[in-house]
Image (cartoon, grey):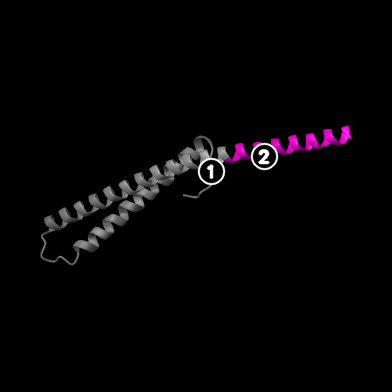
């Protein structure tokens, strides 16, 4: 992911394509690792080797999907947390600005009276 915000349908399409390509790379990586895992097991028949590779790939992809879902959930919770913090900071900033303005107004009024 590039980290730059995207807007509109083109951005959504680009995100979809990027996600698809990343998932295809994950599949290719899982298949390669499955072949490397089953390679040294020379006593396996072709059918057994294919079954082990298939299960290895399925397990790897299931774990990858679970990891991605966990990361997405954490991103959503962080976004909510940061939005709440931003709102609180904004309220504080407005409060301080109003207090400073009120103080300046009071000082100006006192100077006019004196």
- Residue 111 is one of the magenta-drawn residues: yes
Q: Position of residue 27 (x, y in %)?
A: 31, 51
Q: Where is residue 107 in the image (x, y as percent from the top left)?
A: 81, 37
Q: Which mark, residue 5?
A: 1
Magenta residues (range): 89-114
Q: Relative to residue 41, is residue 16 drawn left or right?
A: right
Q: Residue at the spot x=45%, y=42% of the render?
A: 15
Q: Which mark, residue 30?
A: none
Q: In this view, does 43 lie above or below 72?
A: below
Secondary structure beneath disc 1?
Answer: loop
Q: Could you say which quadrant of the image residue 31 lies in?
A: bottom left
Q: Residue at the spot x=78%, y=38% of the render?
A: 104
Q: Which mark, residue 96?
A: 2
Q: Relative to residue 50, is residue 24 drawn left or right?
A: right
Q: Relative to residue 56, is residue 91 drawn left or right?
A: right
Q: Is residue 103 above or below residue 23?
A: above
Secondary structure beneath disc 2?
Answer: helix
């Amino acid at each position: 992911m590039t980290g730059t915000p995207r807007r509109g349908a083109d951005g959504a399409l680009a995100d979809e394509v990027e996600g698809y390509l990343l998932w295809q790379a994950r599949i290719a990586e899982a298949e390669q690792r499955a072949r490397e895992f089953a390679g040294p097991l020379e006593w396996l028949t072709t059918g057994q080797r294919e079954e082990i590779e298939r299960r290895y790939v399925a397990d790897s992809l299931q774990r990858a999907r679970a990891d991605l879902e966990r990361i997405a959930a954490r991103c959503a919770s962080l976004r909510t947390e940061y939005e709440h913090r931003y709102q609180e900071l904004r309220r504080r900033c407005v409060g301080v600005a109003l207090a400073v303005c009120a103080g300046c107004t009071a000082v100006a009024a006192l100077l006019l009276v004196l």
